[in-house]
Amino acid sequence: MKEVTLVVENETGLHARPAKVFVNIAKKYASDIRVLHGEKRVNAKSLISMLTLGAERGAQIQIVVDGEDEDEALLALQTAVEEGLGEE
């Protein structure tokens, strides 16, 4: 199991478009991927679940990945969050 804590820096946080980018990346991997924010822990492969996090700009999230391709999955998701999830 691998995990990383990140700060959401893109303008709109983890809302519609950025959350969709995140989910689409997560779905490429076989590993179980969860995102934690506050008291919530959700399935990163579910757009509806990701939207329930309510992670705004500046929010701290934790990504937890467990499975055969956990290293690749974590790196891809961390990079995507750090690069703004498709937003400028």
Image (spheres, grey):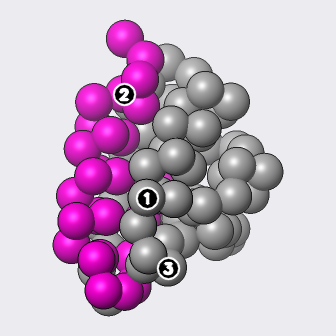
3D distance between C-alphas at marks 3 and 2? 23 Å
Residue 24, horizontal then vertical, whole percent: 52, 46
The residue tagged 1 is 28
Mark 2 Cα-neighbour bin, 10 Å: few <14, some 14–19, many ≥20: some
Mark 3 Cα-neighbour bin, 10 Å: few <14, some 14–19, many ≥20: some
Residue at the image position 27 percent from the left and 52 percent from the top: 76
The residue tagged 3 is 32
Residue at the image position 22 percent from the left and 58 percent from the top: 75
The residue tagged 2 is 84
Q: Earlier in the sequence, mark 1 or mark 2?
A: 1
Is-magenta flag for residue 5? Answer: no
Is-magenta flag for residue 64? Answer: yes
3D distance between C-alphas at marks 1 and 2? 19 Å
Q: Which residues are magenta?
A: 60-88
Classify mark 3: helix, strand or loop: strand
Quadrant of the rendered structure where residue 87 is?
Answer: top left
Seen in the picture, residue 29 relative to 46 is either above or below; the reply is: below
In front: label 3 or label 2: 3
Residue 74, horizontal then vertical, whole percent: 29, 64
3D distance between C-alphas at marks 1 and 3? 11 Å
Residue 46, horizontal then vertical, whole percent: 69, 58
Residue 38 seen in the figure: no
Residue 18, horizontal then vertical, whole percent: 54, 31
Classify mark 2: helix, strand or loop: loop
Quarter of the N terminus within the rendering: bottom left
**Residue type, label 3:** Asp
